[in-house]
Image: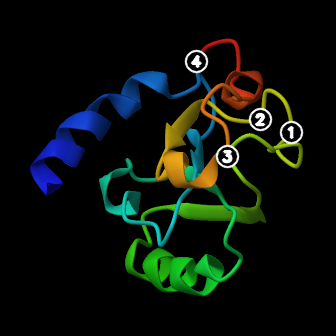
Amino acid sequence: MNDSKRELFRNLEKFYPPKGALRILEVGCGSGANFEHYPTGCRITCTDPNPHFQKYLKKTMAKNDHLVYDSFIVASGENLKAVEDNSVDVVVPGYAEGSARSKESSEACKFMTVSA
């Protein structure tokens, strides 16, 4: 599984903005199982409908000190109003199927910057 994830995330560096850190929104982050695969210096915003995941995220972030943890937002995948428009470079659907109540409903694109 780790080899598959490594392959999926190896192209993230292509999305770095001209200035600053790569900003990632992970929808349905769970306990943060993808964090080890993100490039050094990324800024991570996490969402999950389960507020209890935040305590597990803190443990995962401590193990992945190559990242900057911006925030944890309690929200389902189709209700991401708390995420500012054009505020991220990449949207990663972590465990998004479990965090979205409707497959037809997606707000992910409105958060991405034009360069993404």
Query: Decide: marks 4, 1 in contact (CB < 8 A)?
Result: no
Q: Secondary structure at mark 2?
A: loop
Q: Is residue 82 above or below residue 109?
A: below
* Cα distance between the residues tagged 4 and 3: 26 Å
* Cα distance between the residues tagged 4 and 1: 15 Å
Q: Name the quadrant containing residue 20.
A: top right
- Position of 35 with respect to 107 (left or right) is left
Q: Name the quadrant containing residue 58.
A: bottom right
Query: Decide: marks 4, 3 in contact (CB < 8 A)?
Result: no
Name the disc covering residue 101, or none.
3
Mark nearer the N terminus (4 vs 1): 1
44 or 65: nearer the viewer: 44
Q: Nearer the viewer, mark 4 or mark 3?
A: 3
Amino acid identity at mark 4 = Ala
Residue bearing the label numbered 4: 116
Amino acid identity at mark 2 = Ser
Residue bearing the label numbered 2: 87
Residue bearing the label numbered 1: 84
Residue 71 appearing in the image: yes
